[in-house]
C-alpha cells in the first residue's frame, strides 16, 4: 500500500475515533431566544461538538456544516433558550414548615433548620442534595450558586460528584459553611450544647482575624464562593470584619455574597467591596446608586411574593384564622415593599440577578418545581418577562463570573439549553414547564420530539 494511501486511511480512522469520543449534535427549533438582545431567531439551529456550542444560525446555513453521522434533535415549534441559573440555592436542605406554635415562637426558619442540622447525618444530607440537584436539573436549572445550609462540605462533595459524572445534577458553585456572627443565623440554642451544632453549619466571626481564618478554613474544602450573613437577630458583622473577609476571599480570587436585609448591613457590604448583596429589602436609593457605581450585584429573592408563603403554610400545616389574618397583613406590607424594590432596582440601573432561596419542602412539588415558582413571583412583583429571563441566564452568569461559559447560546459556550412549548416572553409561566433540558451537550430530558 502506498504511504499516501496509508496515511489517508489512518487520518480517516482518526476522524471516526474522534467523532466517537466527541459526538456532534444538531438541535433545531422554531424559535431560539437570545436573552441578551431579546431577539428571536426563527427557525434556528445549534451545532454542538463535545460539550460546546460550535455554531448557531438558520438551519439551512448550520446543517451543511454538521459532520456525517450527526445526531439531530428536532424540537418542532418549541422555544429554545439558555439553561437556567438559580443564583441563590440551598440544595442540601429541605426544611418542613414548623407547627403553628413553633412558627409563632421561633419563626418559620429556625426549627426546621435545627432539625436538618442536628437530625440528619452528613451522609443523609449528601443523598438529599443529590435528589434536590437532580430535580432542579430536570426543571431546567443547569447551574446553581449554592449559598450555604449544606453542612461542613456537603455542597462541595455534591459538586465534585456531579462533575465526575457519578451523579446527575446542575453545575454547582459551592459556598461551604456560611460566615456568620457569633451564634450563627436565626437559631436559639442552649449555650451548653450550641457549639457543636453551630460548627456543622457556620463559621462564626467575632473579629477581623476570625473572619480571615474562616475564609481560609472554607478554602480547605475548595469552595467556589464565600457566603457571609451580615445581619441576623440584631447581630451584625462589622465593617472591619467584613472588609477582612472580602480582602481574604479576593486574594484567593473568590467572590463574596452577603446576606443583608437591613440598611446597616447593606452599607457594610457596600463599603467592604462585596460582590453581591442577597435579599437587600432595606436598601435605600442612595445605596442602590453606590451599588451601581461599584458594580455590586443585587440578587433578588422574591419567591414568596404575593401570598405564596401563606399558600406554602396551608399546604404544609394547619393554621388558625388568627395566624392567617396576621400573615395576610404582613404579606400586604411585604408586597408593597417588594414591588417598590423591584421598580427601584430596574430604574436605578443596578446589576441584578435572581435566586429562589428555596430551602423548603413544598408538598406536591419537586425541588425544581418549587424553585421555578420564583418566575411568576417576580412577574407579579412588576418585573417584565424578558428581564426575568435575563436575571436567570445572562445576568446570573455574570454575577457568578461564569459569563464566558454559561448563560447564553453562543459559540464557545457550554451547551446548556432548555426548551419550552410556548413563548416565555409572552407567558413567563412557560418556565415552570420546561420540556427539554440539555447540559454539557447531553440530553437530560426531552418531552418534545423523538431523536434521530
Image (spheres, rainbow, N blue to C red):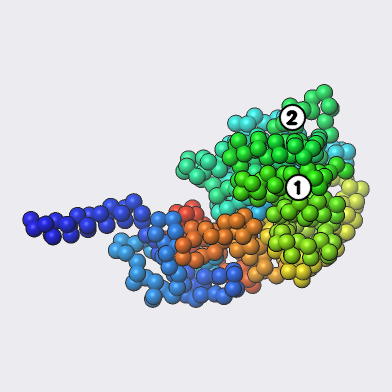
* x, y percent for residue 72: 38, 63
Q: CA distance from mark 2 to mark 1?
A: 27 Å
Q: Residues within 10 Å of mark 2 (few under 14, many from 20)?
A: some
The residue drawn where x is 56% and y is 70% is: 34
The residue drawn where x is 50% and y is 45% is: 163
Residue 251 appears left or right of 180: left
Q: Looking at this rendering, what residue extends furthest in the top direction? A: 192
Which badge, 2 or 1, is on the more N-terminal residue? Answer: 2
* x, y percent for residue 357: 71, 50
Q: Secondary structure at mark 1?
A: helix
Write down the quadrant of residue 63 in the picture.
Answer: bottom left
Residue at label 2? 197
**Quadrant showing the N terminus:** bottom left
Looking at the rendered image, the disc whose residue lies closer to the viewer, 2 or 1, is 1
Residue 419 appears left or right of 243: left
Q: Does the rendering let one see residue 280?
A: yes
273 and 144: which one is in front?
273
Can you say whether 149 is above or below 302 in the image? above
The residue drawn where x is 74% and y is 29% is: 197
* x, y percent for residue 377: 73, 60
The residue drawn where x is 36% and y is 54% is: 22
Can you say whether 100 is above or below 48 in the image? above
Q: Residues within 10 Å of mark 1 (few under 14, many from 20)?
A: many
Write down the quadrant of residue 355 in the picture.
Answer: bottom right
* x, y percent for residue 165: 46, 43
Write down the quadrant of residue 47 in the picture.
Answer: bottom left
Residue at label 1? 243
Amino acid at each position: 500500500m502506498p504511504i499516501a494511501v496509508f496515511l489517508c486511511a489512518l487520518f480517516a480512522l482518526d476522524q471516526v475515533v474522534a467523532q466517537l469520543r466527541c459526538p456532534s449534535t444538531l438541535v433545531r427549533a422554531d424559535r431560539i431566544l437570545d436573552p441578551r438582545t431579546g431577539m428571536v431567531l426563527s427557525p434556528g439551529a445549534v451545532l454542538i461538538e463535545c460539550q460546546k456550542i460550535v455554531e448557531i444560525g438558520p438551519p439551512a446555513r448550520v446543517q451543511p456544516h454538521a459532520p456525517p453521522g450527526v445526531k439531530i434533535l428536532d424540537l418542532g415549534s418549541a422555544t429554545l433558550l439558555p439553561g437556567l441559573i438559580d443564583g441563590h440555592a440551598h440544595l442540601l436542605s429541605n426544611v418542613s414548615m414548623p407547627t403553628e406554635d413553633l412558627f409563632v415562637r421561633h419563626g418559620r426558619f429556625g426549627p426546621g433548620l435545627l432539625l436538618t442540622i442536628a437530625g440528619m447525618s452528613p451522609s443523609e444530607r449528601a443523598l438529599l442534595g443529590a435528589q434536590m440537584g437532580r430535580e432542579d436539573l430536570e426543571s431546567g436549572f443547569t447551574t446553581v450558586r449554592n449559598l450555604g445550609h449544606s453542612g461542613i462540605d456537603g455542597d462541595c462533595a455534591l459538586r465534585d460528584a456531579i462533575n465526575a459524572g457519578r451523579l446527575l445534577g446542575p453545575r454547582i458553585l459551592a459556598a461551604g459553611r456560611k460566615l456568620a456572627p457569633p451564634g450563627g443565623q436565626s437559631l436559639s440554642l442552649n449555650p451548653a450544647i450550641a457549639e457543636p451544632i453551630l460548627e456543622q453549619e457556620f463559621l462564626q466571626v467575632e473579629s477581623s482575624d476570625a473572619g480571615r481564618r474562616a475564609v481560609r478554613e472554607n478554602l480547605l474544602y475548595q469552595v467556589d464562593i464565600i457566603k457571609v450573613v451580615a445581619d441576623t437577630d440584631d447581630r451584625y458583622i462589622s465593617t472591619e470584619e467584613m472588609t477582612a473577609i472580602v480582602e481574604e476571599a479576593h486574594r484567593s480570587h473568590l467572590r463574596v455574597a452577603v446576606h443583608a436585609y437591613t440598611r446597616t448591613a447593606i452599607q457594610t457590604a457596600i463599603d467592604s467591596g462585596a460582590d453581591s448583596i442577597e435579599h437587600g429589602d432595606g436598601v435605600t436609593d442612595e445605596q442602590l446608586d453606590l451599588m451601581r457605581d461599584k458594580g455590586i450585584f443585587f440578587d433578588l429573592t422574591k419567591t414568596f411574593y404575593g401570598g405564596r408563603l401563606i399558600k406554602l403554610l396551608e399546604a404544609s400545616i394547619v393554621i388558625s384564622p388568627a395566624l392567617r389574618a396576621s400573615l395576610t397583613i404582613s404579606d400586604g406590607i411585604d408586597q408593597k415593599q417588594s414591588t417598590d424594590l423591584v421598580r427601584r432596582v430596574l430604574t436605578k440601573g443596578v446589576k441584578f440577578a435572581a435566586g429562589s432561596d428555596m430551602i423548603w419542602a413544598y408538598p406536591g412539588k419537586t425541588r425544581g418545581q418549587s424553585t421555578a415558582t420564583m418566575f411568576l413571583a417576580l412577574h407579579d412583583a412588576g418585573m417584565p418577562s424578558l428581564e426575568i429571563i435575563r436575571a436567570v441566564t445572562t445576568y446570573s452568569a455574570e454575577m457568578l463570573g461564569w459569563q464566558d461559559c454559561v448563560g447564553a447560546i453562543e459559540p464557545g459556550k457550554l451547551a446548556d439549553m432548555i426548551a419550552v412549548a410556548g413563548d416565555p416572553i409572552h407567558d413567563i409561566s412557560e418556565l415552570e414547564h420546561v420540556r427539554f433540558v440539555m447540559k454539557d451537550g447531553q440530553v437530560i430530558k426531552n418531552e418534545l420530539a423523538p431523536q434521530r
